[in-house]
Amino acid sequence: MNAGNPQVSERAATPHGTLRYWAAAREAAGTAQEPYAASTLAEALRGAVAAHGGEGGALAAVLRRCAFVIDGAPAGKRDPAAVELVEGGTVEVLPPFAGGAA
């Protein structure tokens, strides 16, 4: 706790935002978008996988091939655990499209 104000936690609140699914990711999730409560991309993806069939589910399989755009910036090859999310952010989940590598 913060010594100056016992009501304020040392740790910031977990950010909330929106996961927006496209193409095969939308089909696997069964929805076009859903909220996340996560500090990193890895946490948000773990939550989505858990909500949609676990590691053996269709969404988990699709996510392994996806690219991610966070608030307009591509995540690229960065480790999802190192990609920080912000309050009110949007994560675009983009599977490979026709002609893309599997």
Image (cartoon, rainbow, N blue to C red):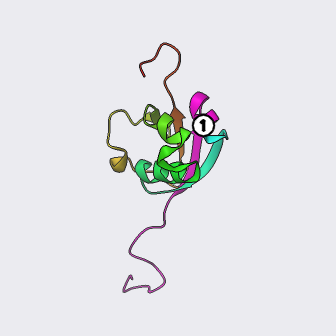
Residue at 57% from the left image edge and 51% from the top image edge: 17
Residue 38 drawn above or below residue 102: below
Residue at 39% from the left image edge and 37% from the top image edge: 75
What is the crowding at mark 1: few (fewer than 14 residues within 10 Å), some, or many (at least 20)? many
Looking at the rendered structure, the secondary structure element under dot 1 is helix
Location of the N terminus (image quadrant): bottom left
Q: Number of labelled discs?
A: 1
Can residue 72 be seen by looking at this rendering?
A: no
| 90 horizontally vs 9: left or right | right
Location of the C terminus (image quadrant): top left
* Bounds of the magenta segment: 1-27
Residue 100 drawn above or below residue 60: above
| 102 horizontally vs 25: left or right | left
Give 40 or 97, whichever is nearer the viewer. 97
Q: Position of residue 4 (x, y in %)?
A: 39, 85
**Tag 1 residue:** 28
- Residue found at the far top of this picture: 99
| 84 horizontally vs 34: left or right | left
Q: Quadrant of residue 76?
A: top left
Q: Position of residue 37 (x, y in %)?
A: 53, 58
In the rendered structure, does residue 10 fall within the stretch colored magenta? yes
In the rendered structure, does residue 70 fall within the stretch colored magenta? no
Can residue 29 be seen by looking at this rendering?
A: yes
Residue 32 drawn above or below residue 7: above
